[in-house]
Image: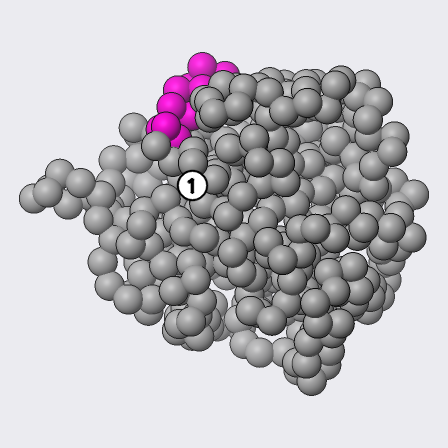
Amino acid sequence: MERSALKPPHFPWYDYSRYTFSLGLNVGRRTLLSGHSASEHDPATRAMEVRGGMREQARTAWAKIAAILEAGGRSLADVVRVVEYVTPAGIERYAEAAAVRGELFGANRPAVNTVVVNSLLRPQALIEVEIEAEPDAPGSSGDRGWPPAWAPARAVDGFVYLSSILPLDDTGALIAPGDPVAQTRAVYERAARVLEAFGLGLHRVVKTVDYLTPAALPDYRHTGRVRREMLGPVFPAATGIIMRRIADPRALIQIDLIASRHQPRPVNPGWGRYAELTYNPAVGAGDLLFLAGQAALDPASARAVYPGDVAAQAAHIYENILRVVAAAGGGPENLVKTVEYVTPAALERYREVAGVRSRMFQAPFPVSTGCVCETLLRPEFMIEVDSLAIIPSE
């Protein structure tokens, strides 16, 4: 399947050729973009700067995205999924970003995932946006009665992308305050109702990303009971990230889900520990391979490795990601997207991860987003990578 980097002829914000990620990729009909904030190079200071409040930053991010999409023959009208990474300061002004999105998108109603991060890699940034697009994408959004510029889910090309789901009832009241297990159940029950409108059930969920607060962590392992009861028989790929807060400050957990009309296929390079878990190293559906989040864990012993060395941890993670991709019949060229969640302790040496990517991948590089989390599921972990591959079927 043809894969090409999107290279705008006019991109005044910075020199994108210096980085080990692509601004965006066209892979067949699909278009994926890295996360983009309002960062731009200031010739006077010779540094990257971020200017303005939430409204101004959102406009700059979307201007970049529009320029990149145009380079690939796409436009905002083709966007089917939006992920907006927002800081704690930014979420307080999130209505401004939503208003900008609504103004720019018009009648297009993508799925929207809102992720509150501890911070972005540019400290002044309030928001970073990544998107997926497909031209003339058939499908539905189940958007009757929903606000402009987003929908509860967007169906396209055999996949259903659900907007972020929080444990809230139809009136916006919090369900099961203080109980992350009951809140997890409430999220899956709402997801089931959304999927029912598309003729699907929870057994077709292929990817979940849990965002949880530190207060949820002591009981988080017990949410596996809910997953075992409500998901499967092919358990999805999964990622779990701890953030200081999530989109609703009252809630303990938020889940972002993707489901598929294609029959899910578990992918495992032979790691026995997954037999006891409620997720797989990866799940294939159609030509997409959804990978579970990978941290610096030895799959055989389940021990954390390379404590205190973010570059070594990243190398170990990417080696394991490529082992999973190989088990699905692909290679490094099939990895198209990564999201790197880094802890505050990793930031001082995080630039070294670019060297790891340059050694392990070749241009056109995968698209990538990086953000700062509160912590990861083990204190030794400094980085976790969530990823996606596209492997055309024979």
Q: Residue furthest bottom?
A: 171
Q: Residue furthest left?
A: 44
At 42% across and 58% down in the image, what residue appears? 87
Between 243 and 13, the residue placed more toward the observer is 243
Q: Quadrant of the N terminus?
A: top right
Residue 291 x %, y %: 68, 35
Give left or right: position of 271 versus 131.
right
Between 365 and 248, the residue placed more toward the observer is 248
Colour scheme shown: one colour
Task: State whether residue 383 appears in this view.
Answer: yes
Q: Residues within 10 Å of mark 1 (few under 14, many from 20)?
A: some
Q: Quadrant of the C terminus?
A: top right
Residue 380 x %, y %: 56, 30
Give left or right: position of 345 versus 180.
left
Query: Majority secondary structure of the magenta segment?
Result: helix
At 54% across and 19% down in the image, what residue appears? 306
Residue 204 x %, y %: 84, 50
Residue 131 vertical placement versus 326 (above, below) = below
Between 267 and 23, the residue placed more toward the observer is 267
At 40% across and 64% down in the image, what residue appears? 90
Circle 1 residue? 344
Range drawn in magenta? 349-364
| Amino acid, disc 1 | Pro
Residue 202 x %, y %: 85, 55
At 36% across and 59% down in the image, what residue appears? 126
Is 244 inside the magenta-drawn segment?
no
Circle 1 sits in a helix, a strand or a loop, which is it? helix
